[in-house]
Amino acid sequence: MVKAIKQKPPKPKKCKCCPVKFIPRNSLQTVCSPKCAIQLANQLSERKQKRLEKEQRAAWNKRKADVKPLSHWVNMTQRVFNDYIRARDGNICISCGSTTAVSYHAGHFRTTAAASHLRFNEDNCHSQCSACNIHHSGAIGSYRIALIAKIGLKRVLAIESDNNPHRYTREELDTIRARYRALLRALFKEREAA
């Protein structure tokens, strides 16, 4: 004698397109009607198209970035570094001590032209009024005196005697830029909390 196997009635599912609950005819059915099936197919097609467009945009942006010269990445990193230096030091000129200047720069003690390997060295760069930085060629004499008072003679001599050339790579510049962005954000958060 063969026993009849009782089949459990299928559990109701929620349609993926509308809030209706339905009893599926098979385990693969996910929508309640042909209208919802068409709507779901359109949604999936749109998602696939958006994902494809996003991937194409990312590939295009990568190709554009790959053809940019190294100087572009140096300039971008320099901007972030300079923003951090100005935020770190505030509106005070290391050379003349002015706190009322119209604008402040991140002035390098040893210029980026003379010592490009020190362009991202925090000891070599400090807030400086635009007049001292541009019109007085950095006002190096008073800059050095204030720098010795600020960081000490030993570190100033280390900057002055460092002549090891260094050529930055794009990956290195990306790392430096990310580091100084994070430091700048942390500095702003710290000041907001205080």
Image (spheres, helix red, strand yellow):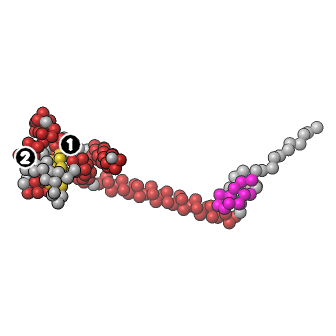
Q: Is residue 50 magenta?
A: no
| N-term-proximal mark, 2 vs 1 | 1
Where residue 127 appears, as percent x and y from the top left, is 18, 50
Numbered disc in front, either 2 or 1: 2
Label 1 sits on residue? 122
The main secondary structure of the magenta stretch is: loop
Amino acid type of the residue tagged 1 in the rendering: Glu
Q: Is residue 13 magenta?
A: yes
Looking at the picture, how far across and down is residue 88, in whole percent? 24, 47
Q: Nearer the viewer, residue 139 or 29?
A: 139
The part of the image, by quadrant, that contains residue 43 is bottom right
Question: Which region shows up in magenta?
Answer: 12-22
Residue occupying image coordinates x 14% and y 51%? 93
Residue, far top: 154
Secondary structure found at label 1? helix
Q: CA distance from mark 2 to mark 1?
A: 18 Å
Image check: 34 left or right of 80? right
Kindly tell me whether residue 75 is visible in this rendering.
Answer: yes
- The answer to whether marks 2 and 1 mark residues whose Cβ atoms lie closer than 8 Å is no
Residue 144 is marked as none
**100 or 49, nearer to the observer:** 100
The residue carrying mark 2 is 142
Classify 10 Å Cα crowding around label 2: few (below 14), some (14-19), many (20 and above).
Answer: some
Q: Tell me residue 37's x, y (percent).
A: 66, 62
Task: Point out the residue furthest to the bottom here.
Answer: 35
